[in-house]
Image (cartoon, grey):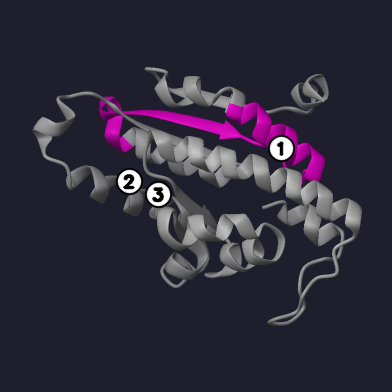
Amino acid sequence: MASSAIAKLGLCPKYINEEPDIPTDVLAELKELEESVVQLLEAALSYGRVVIVTAAETGWVELSASLFMPRLVPFFNTRIKVISARSTYEYLYPECPRRWKVEAFNHEVFPVWESFDEEDSCGIPRHVISLGDGPTEREALINVKMQAMDACHGKSMKLIAYPKISELQLEVELILANMEHLCTHEGDLDLQITWEMLNASA
């Protein structure tokens, strides 16, 4: 969602229903990023279920999309579940923010698996893929993998923290270029996008 870049540019709304005044050059970057993110979400959905787990409050992802990337709104309305780990689990673990996403991952992964008959899986490991710019997504995925053991392939991709819009664009393009391998590789993956990789692809 280019949250850090948008915040750094002072474009975050200060009150409900505020329409941000987006400079023309920034708007062009956001439109290009929006197109790539649409492609990324479509590609991800072609491989399976997609869930967005955020540490922001409930509604923040949808609001941000409506203001800065409106073409994403239909995804969140009907095709992709958005969960606020904060709003859902903060009251249970008020002193442990790192636990919020762990619980959210557990709640989204294991009940879904249990809804399938054993014969449906035929012992084939399921693929659980986590993309995020913080350590908590990776920790939550590792927790799932430790519980599931050989029942799943756990795959983590760490993105760079606080990217500019143009840098996030490059990250999305890198993920898209490697989506098939990421989703079909029969094994665990622990990956990280680095500044060197972005500079090489720029």
Q: Residue 89: which disc?
A: none
Residue 181 percent across, percent down from the top left: 49, 19
In the rendered structure, which amino acid carries the disc numbered 1?
Ile
Q: Residue 109: which disc?
A: 2
Local secondary structure at mark 1: loop
Asked whether 71 falls inside the magenta stretch, the response is no
- Residue identified by numbered label 1: 160
In the rendered structure, which amino acid carries the disc numbered 2?
Val
Q: Which is nearer the N-term, disc 1 or disc 3?
A: 3
Residue 44 percent across, percent down from the top left: 47, 37
Q: Does 107 sit left or right of 194 as displayed?
A: left
- 71 up-or-down from 112: above or below: below
Q: Name which residue lies at 50% across and 40% down.
A: 42
- Residue identified by numbered label 3: 105
Examine the image and state in which quarter residue 187 appears.
top left
Q: Is residue 142 visible?
A: no
- Marks 1 and 3, Cα distance to the nearest angstrom? 21 Å
Residue furthest bottom as drawn: 16
- Kindly indicate whether the residue at mark 3 contacts the one at mark 2 (C-beta within 8 angstroms): yes
Q: Which is nearer the N-term, disc 1 or disc 2?
A: 2
Magenta stretch bounds? 147-176
